[in-house]
Image (cartoon, helix red, strand yellow):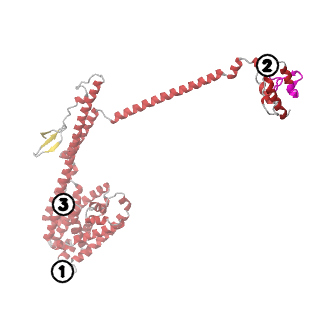
Amino acid sequence: MSGSNTTPLVEAGAESSTVSAVDHPENVLAHSSELMGSHPSYFTDNGLRTPGFSSSSSLPSTPGLSRSGSYIGTTTDDSDEYFQEFPPLDRLTIFDVLENLALPQRLEKLQRSVSAQTEKVRRQQQKLKSTSLNAKDKVVEELRRRVPTPDEQLDKYRKRMRDGVDRLNLRWSDAKSVTAREKMSFIAGVLNIFVSGYMMGALPEMFHYWYTAQLCYFMPIRYYTYHKKGYHYFLADLCYFVNLLMLLSIWFFPQSKRLFISTYCLAMGNNAIAIAMWRNSLVFHSLDKVTSLFIHIMPCVTLHCLIHLLSPEAQAERFPAIYNIKYSSPTSPDHYSLGAMIVWATVPYAVWQLSYHFLITVRRREKIAAGRPTSFTWLRKSYAPTLLGKLVLSLPDSLQEPAFMLIQYSYALLTMLPCPIWFWYRWASAAFLCAVFIWSVYNGATYYIDVFGKRMEKELEELRREVSRWQGSSDAGHSDAKETKGTDDQKGNAPIKESEPEWERTKVVDEIEVPLLDGKEGSTATQSSTGRFRGGKQ
């Protein structure tokens, strides 16, 4: 049937279906036959069928509601196969419906899911609880470790006080602060002054033996100690080079006038003035300071003995260079003027300066830059606040070392200018040596009083500050203990008796004696840990 025939039939049926179906039900079949008689799919050999259903189908379709002429009255194989999967409606029971829904399996699956989620939540809660407990324990342990108890604080301050007192006693008690080596150094230093003075007056011809013996004793010790401390670059300084020239002039080349005059100018010039410049001091108990003073002043004293205290016969026999220079006429070639002295002194100085520059400054540049001290680095640091130090430091790094070498040579030349006076005049030479020696004694007195004494005073002040801090901490500990006691009473806990805690039992601390200098000989004043002073006899 085409689409043009379907539309009027459906519209005509829609107009009269209500009236005819109610008033004349017997006409419904006839009317349907009249409407659909021309369509063969509505009728089979067995009679009338429901439109759109096959013989095995029990559920009607609704193709008649469509206006499409191509769908009315047609069936598909897919529809038949789909509906054949279901049983007839008259045979369908509630158990079939429940079986198709699979309710027990779904309920079991849902129950397992709920149980798994519950177990997961429970494990998470236990994990969080254990983590929080561990974190709490760690925090409590850390706080306990960082915040000591009052007893621990008391023990700590007791130990610090005792350590401070022990340090002070080590320096103030002669039996502990001065070691056997320092005692021997003190004795040797005093005896050295006594023996040197005696030999200058009684045996001047033997003084160069005394100087050589001391040099052989001090120099190995100096090399060992300086090499151990990392100061061995100082052993290449000019003062050690001058002592080497002294040995050569005395024992190997006593007839060389040029070597002798060079040695004399460098010793009486550079070495003698270096006592003031390098702050050499006469500190008897310090072997290092005694050695430094010996290296600078003993060559000068030895030359004074050889030139002014030795007899002419001994000079002519043992030291011909000194005799020829001293007793030569002003017009003689053996007579050396100031210009000749400076010229011949410059030659060994130039040899030393160039050797020092290439062997130390250039070849050891990396070690010096890493912190190994030299005379240049020491002078640059020591004299940095002065005008000359600021001038050198204002130059580029590449020019600082040449400037230092030029300044050092100028300094050597300035110290050589009065050397002819010291050579030709005995009392001028003696006065100069006395002035240099007094300068070293003054430096030693400054060390004993200002440095050594202030060091002891600093130790005492530090101990007093520790006592004050301990007293403040003890007062704070008492306040904390009282606050803790009041808090426990407010909470309803049993009150703590004041005589029970260890803090209260150790409230009175044993007195620790701090030795202080007293005006009376053989007596000291002692300070207790509470700050009170009391006198006592040793």
Can you give x and y, in whole percent of width and height, for residue 364 in the image? Answer: 37, 62
Residue 103 figure quarter:
top right
Residue assigned mark 1: 330
Q: Which residue is mark 2?
A: 22
Query: Residue flagged by tag 1: what amino acid is it?
Result: Pro
Part of the protein shown in magenta: 34-57
* Residue at image location 31% in from the left, 58% down from the top: 231
At a point 31% along the width and 54% down the height, the residue shown is 228
Q: Nearer the viewer, residue 198 or 330?
A: 330
Whether pointer 2 and pointer 3 mark residues with C-beta atoms closer than 8 Å, the reply is no
497 lies above or below 445? above
**Residue 38 shown in magenta:** yes
Counting residues from the start of the chain, the first of labels 2 and 3 encountered is 2
Q: Residues within 10 Å of mark 3 (few under 14, many from 20)?
A: many
- Residue under pointer 3: 440
Quadrant containing the C terminus is top left
> Image check: 495 left or right of 97?
left
Tell me the quarter of the picture where residue 54 sits.
top right
**Spatial separation of the CA atoms under disc 2 and disc 3:** 150 Å
Under mark 2, the amino acid is Val
